[in-house]
């Protein structure tokens, strides 16, 4: 599910040269799923879903 290095390099270049960089840049096969989630959920929830899918521990409530 990883993006090819050329694709990632192009996105990194864009992030470094944008006048107003975004908080997130998408590449690879997961980009479509993430784009759909971003439209439906707040950023914090998208980050939580992504972390769970990657097997990262969830945050403890404050």
Image (spheres, grey):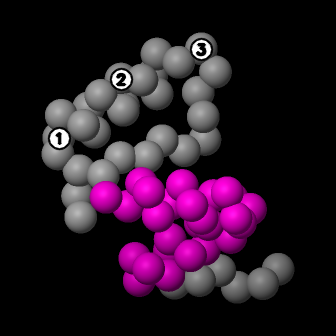
- 27 over 7 or under it: above or below: below
Q: Going by the image, does 13 lie left or right of 57?
A: left
- The residue that appears at 71% across and 66% down in the rendered structure is 41
Q: How much space separates mark 3 and mark 2, taking CA atoms?
A: 12 Å
- Residue range of the region highlighted in magenta in the rendering: 29-56
* Of the image marks 2 and 1, the number of the one nearer the N terminus: 1
Magenta stretch containing residue 48, yes or no?
yes
Q: Alpha-carbon neighbours of circle 3 within 10 Å: few (<14), some, or many (≥20)?
A: few
Give residue 27's position: percent from left, percent from top: 35, 46
**Can you see residue 31?**
yes
Q: Secondary structure under badge 1?
A: helix
Give residue 1's position: percent from left, percent from top: 24, 64
Q: Going by the image, does 14 lie left or right of 39?
A: left
- The residue that appears at 46% across and 16% down in the rendered structure is 17
* Residue that mark 3 sits on: 19
* Of the image marks 1 and 3, the number of the one nearer the N terminus: 1
Report the quarter where the C terminus lies: bottom right
* Residue that mark 2 sits on: 13
Q: Secondary structure under badge 3?
A: loop
């Amino acid at each position: 599910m990883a993006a090819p290095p050329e694709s990632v390099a192009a996105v990194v270049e864009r992030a470094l040269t944008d006048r107003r960089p975004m908080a997130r840049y998408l590449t690879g096969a997961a980009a479509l799923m993430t784009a759909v989630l971003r439209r439906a959920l707040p950023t914090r929830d998208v980050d939580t879903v992504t972390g769970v899918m990657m097997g990262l521990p969830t945050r403890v409530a404050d």
